[in-house]
Amino acid sequence: MIICSWNVRGLNAPSKVVEVRRFLQKNEIDVVALVETRVVNKTDQFIHGVICTKTGLTTFEFTAVYGLHTIDHRKPLWVDLVNIASTVSKPWLLMGDFNSVLYSGDRINGSQVQDSETRDFEGCIDAAGLAELKSCGHFFSWSNKGQGDRGISSRIDRALGCAAWHTVFDGAIVDYLNPGISDHSPLVLTCNAEDHSKGRPFRFFNYMAGHPSFTQVVQDGWKVNIHGTAMYQVWQKLKCVKQGLKTLHKKEFARLEERIDNIRTDLDGIQHLLAATPTDSELQVNEKKQLELLKKFLGIQESAYRQKSRIQWLKTGDSNSKFFFSAMKERYTRNSIDLLYDTAGRKLVTTEEIQKEICDFYKELVGSAADNLVGIDLDVVRKGNQLTANAAQGLVVPVTNEEIDVALAGINIHKAPGLDGFNSFFFKKAWGIVKDDVYAAVKEFLKLAKC
């Protein structure tokens, strides 16, 4: 589905109607929110509704926004959006001209952005649990069409979504296109519900190390007999451990949100019965079990969100799940490539097209030769500071097991995992089982590197 928001002043002009129709047909727009300033009064600053595809597979709430021109006149808009946030039950998307900047860099030329301009908008986003969608194309969405230093540009058109929106539409991206006949850029959003039926790469979650079966799973995977180099043996044994951990995760931790909801439902039912018979000892025991189970899985959920968000300055256990979740989604959005333009200006949106374009780009770089290379300044090398013979010899002495231990201990457990999906926390927890093979692999690698 392709959604567009565009502020087109003077839309009644026949020439603009023709251009808008051509734009909508060219970009195959499914839903469009056209804002004409004279249509909006001082109190109606948005239109809210539910969008459903013909198949019924995709349904979400949509708010088309047009903010009024003064800070005071926009205040009711922020209040209304926060109120809507408390009632939405589906993924929620907001698009339009908010007529308000959000950050200090959202305007060039003109007056400097003041805190009073952004405070209400920031408060609304925080209170409503919204986050801006990933965007490409133009950064500034509005221009006064002034010449030279009199030209003022600002980013006042935006697309925002709630947490549920970012979960369902992971790959949604907003394209800020050329303004054409308007002084605002049209915002074109391509969104399709993500298909998570395909397998995702393995990732070791730290909470798995706390499961009673963790050590046994690692031992079972590590005791397989592998022939080959030391590094190959470690790689293959990790693959065996990975299979065991996948089975454990599927059995004990899969569908975490659904499991938490079921526990809450069971707890609610037990507490309803307890309200009628407060002295029932069996219900009291069941309530205690469900409460402990709920706390356990809420802690696991928060730990998973924290690990995915890579936030390191907060600790788990303080009910930071909402913050970690938002940070996780923001990081995922920032690190993913969902839209790309090739050298011919053609928009690439499918994974296959983007992968091919990136591969072709780097293949062309690898196959090209530089016209000249900067040489080494031999005078600097010969006359500069040099290591003594003993110090130089110390750099090539064999690495000891103790040095490998110290290196592992120095890796933060929240750092990104390797290509195999295992992070330093896994190795620290399983070190007693895997260390001898890892010692051999590291020493073998460094020995071969000298050859």
Image (cartoon, helix red, strand yellow):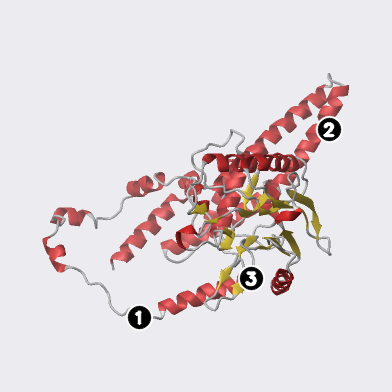
Task: Say which mark, if any, is on residue 302.
Answer: none
Query: Are circles 3 and 1 on residues that touch, CB within 8 Å?
Result: no
- Seen as rendered, the residue at the extreme right is 276
Residue type of the residue flagged with mark 1: Ala
Question: In 3D space, how far apart are the residues under numbered discs 3 and 2 (Cα atoms)?
Answer: 46 Å
N-term mark: 2 or 1: 2
N-term mark: 3 or 1: 3
Label 3 SS: loop
Q: Nearer the viewer, mark 3 or mark 2?
A: 3
Report whether 221 appears left or right of 297.
Answer: left
Q: Residue at x 60, y 37 (%)?
A: 320
Residue 211 in the image: x percent, y percent? 61, 42
Other-residue count near label 2 (Cα within 10 Å), few / some / many at <14 / 14–19 / ≥20 = few
Question: In 3D space, how far apart are the residues under numbered discs 3 and 1 (Cα atoms)?
Answer: 31 Å
Q: In which quarter of the image is the C terminus?
A: bottom left
Q: Which of 414 and 114 is in front in this view?
A: 114
Which residue is disc 3 drawn over? 350
Q: In this view, does 280 lie above or below 256?
A: above
Q: In which quarter of the image is the N terminus?
A: bottom right
Report whether 236 appears left or right of 391.
Answer: right
Other-residue count near label 3 (Cα within 10 Å), few / some / many at <14 / 14–19 / ≥20 = few
Residue 223 in the image: x percent, y percent? 52, 55
The answer to whether residue 216 is seen in the rendering is no
Which residue is disc 1 drawn over? 369
Which residue is disc 2 drawn over? 269
Q: Which residue is drawn at 48% across and 75% down?
A: 361
Q: In this view, does 192 lie above or below 82?
A: below
- Seen as rendered, the residue at the extreme left is 383
Tell me the quarter of the picture where residue 53 sits. Answer: bottom right
